[in-house]
Amino acid sequence: MAQPPPDVGEDDCLPEYRHLFCPDLLRDKVAFITGGGSGIGFRIAEIFMRHGCHTVIASRSFPRVSMAARKLAAATGQRCLPLSMDVRDPPAIMAAVDQALKEFGKIDILINCAAGNFLCPASSLSFNAFKTVMDIDTLGTFNVSHVLYKKFFREHGGVIVNITATLGTRGQVLQVHAGSAKAAVGMAPHLVCSPGCLRVPLLPGPESPLQPRPPQK
């Protein structure tokens, strides 16, 4: 049985990769990945690209996604379009999707990976901190799915993958905000009633130790 590739500690491409699937499994597909400049989103982009996929990686920080795109393209030989986009801002999402469609002519896969999280007891959580995480994780997932469905998937079909978390299904200390947001990302079974798309929720465990700091106001 093939072993998973060794991971790296930073947002860099893997030093080696042994294909676990057919190398051209995603040849000429196009994936739109929110939160693609770092963490889980970055690694998803890399693995997709190593299997022949072109990607669009979107984040609020354009310098971050630009650097990530250069790393990904150099390591895989596939095209990677970096875009600055806030998943809480529908007009910005519309503009980003339009730019991606202009660049590639299609989008086959949407990965909703943008998220915000930090460690904080519920008693110390500010109204703004709770709302910020809900807006990014939950509303952001709906916003991007809604825009891409109306602009492309409704007529052409596509796949939507929502990155949620196991903490949305059970209680966890210091995570009432993220757990609530991720539980709501479980909207996938309801969205699947819309024709033309396949929606798949993925629930990874903790990626790395979180730092106890709230988002900036």
Image (cartoon, helix red, strand yellow):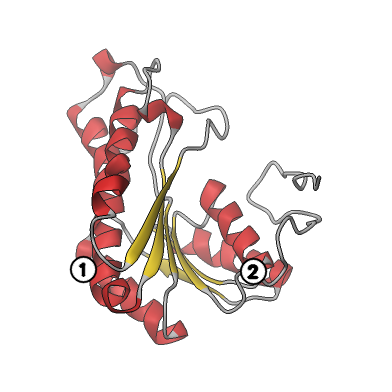
Question: Disc 2 residue type?
Answer: Leu
Tell me the SS state at disc 1: helix
- Location of residue 33 in the rendering, given as x and y in whole percent from the top left corner: 45, 61
Q: In which quarter of the image is the N terminus?
A: top right
- Location of residue 40 in the rendering, given as x and y in whole percent from the top left corner: 54, 47
Tell me the SS state at disc 2: loop
Select label 2 or label 1 by which is in front. 2
- Vertical order, 44 against 131 (above or below): below
- Camera-nearest residue between 89 and 17: 17
The residue lying furthest to the left in this view is 127
- Vertical order, 69 against 14 (above or below): below
Question: Disc 1 residue type?
Answer: Pro
Residues packed near mark 1 inside 10 Å, few (<14), some (14 to 19) or many (20 plus)? some
- Location of residue 79 in the rendering, given as x and y in whole percent from the top left corner: 59, 77
- Camera-nearest residue between 114 and 184: 184
- Location of residue 88 in the rendering, given as x and y in whole percent from the top left corner: 25, 54
- Camera-nearest residue between 179 and 99: 179
What separation in Å lies between label 2 and label 1 (alpha carbons)?
A: 33 Å
Residue denoted by label 2: 25
Residue 22, image quadrant:
bottom right
- Vertical order, 121 against 57 (above or below): above
For the question of whether residue 217 can be seen, the reply is no
Residue denoted by label 1: 91
State which tag comes first along the sequence, 2 or 1. Answer: 2
